[in-house]
Amino acid sequence: MARNHAVRDRKDCWALLLAAGDGRRLIELTTTRKGLTVPKQFCSLRRGPSLLQSALRRAAGLTSSDRICAVVSADHRKWWNEQLESLPAENIFIQPRNRGTANGILFPLLNILQRDPDARILLLPSDHHVRDEDTLAESISVAVTRSQPLAPGIVLMGLQPRNPDPELGYIVPGPDRGGGYREVEQFVEKPPAPVARQLIDRGALWNAFIIAADAPALLKLFERRSPDIVVALSEIISAPANDLSRGQRLFELYEALPTRDFSRQILPGHEPHLRVLPVPECGWSDLGTPRRVAEVLRELEDDRTPLRSHGSGQARYLSLAAQHERVHRGFSL
């Protein structure tokens, strides 16, 4: 991936890898023959690096390692502990349990704000595949650096749809506001295929859940939707590091927290405060279902695109490709 040194040299740019999900929709492919289920982000697409490691490399093209963070689940420690060893320990935010993407963003957001009140944060899912990394990186760089004088505080990456997929979220863009940014007219989550086709005909884009945002602007979205949760988490995070009750208080809060989805329960209604940046075709997939995994594998076979090497450890992770063969073609691992 091409590195954008203009971004990397800025001290306010942070990358937050979202790595706490359980990946239940893909459980058919992420469960081994012995019954062990490995969350998708800790698997490899083929027999190479894990998806999380690919996301780490994506982030490293935009900022330095001391400003790359990850939010993870305590239950997944046996998988992320080694894969995130390149990050400073204070950059790994451990949730007692997964309580949805909204809480999974708010928890590290408050921690980063405490360290850098002016942070510009890139929210980056850790379980996606991108065929053309350079194309995506160029668009992300535009959004992160706020290259236009009046660039918006919160920018969503909108991917060009390849088909009317009813299992993805869509962003309907509004008028052009300059610099490539469009207004956000509407969010539509997982519409039926005929509706998805109508949305695409209107110019709708896939919501990749890749977001560049000024941290204070992002926090305001949560304060409007979940002020009580913001206050409760803030009180725990602002406690002194030597407060021995801090961990227990966080555990108890997470036991009581409702599961909240960022796309469904935080973003809708905030359209006037958001912009979308259309991203040229880059071969993006969230690998969210066995069908979408199969589609990506077919594309890789058709264009003979090699996976880039990430050094040693080339067959250490559960391979979604091998699992797909075992499940759907009767092959053994």
Image (spheres, rainbow, N blue to C red):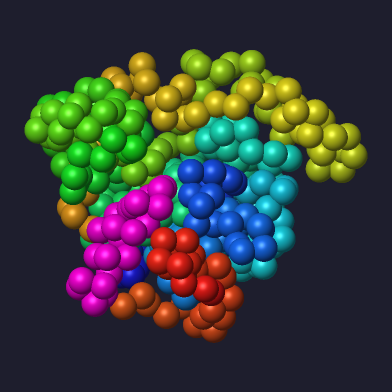
Please state if 82 lies on the left or on the right of 61 as rendered: right
Residue drawn at point x = 30 percent, y = 22 percent: 271
- Residue 226 quadrant: top right
Q: Does 126 appear in magenta?
A: no
Q: Nearer the viewer, residue 275 or 286?
A: 286
Q: Nearer the viewer, residue 255 or 323?
A: 323
Please state if 57 lies on the left or on the right of 20 as rendered: left
Q: Position of residue 217 (x, y in %)?
A: 43, 29
Residue drawn at point x = 60 percent, y = 62 percent: 32
Q: Does 292 appear in magenta?
A: yes
Task: Give the mark count.
Answer: 0
Identify the magenta region: 283-305
Q: Position of residue 254 (x, y in %)?
A: 72, 30
Which secondary structure dominates the residues rendered in magenta? helix
50 to 23, vertically: above or below: below
Please state if 109 lies on the left or on the right of 212 as rendered: right
Q: Position of residue 90 (x, y in %)?
A: 69, 53
Residue drawn at point x = 38 percent, y = 45 percent: 210
Q: Position of residue 151 (x, y in %)?
A: 26, 37
101 to 28, vertically: above or below: above
Please state if 110 lies on the left or on the right of 145 as rendered: right
Q: Which image quarter is the N terminus in?
A: bottom left
- Residue 305 quadrant: bottom left
- Residue 179 visible within the image: no
Residue drawn at point x = 53 percent, y = 74 percent: 333
Q: Residue furthest right?
A: 244
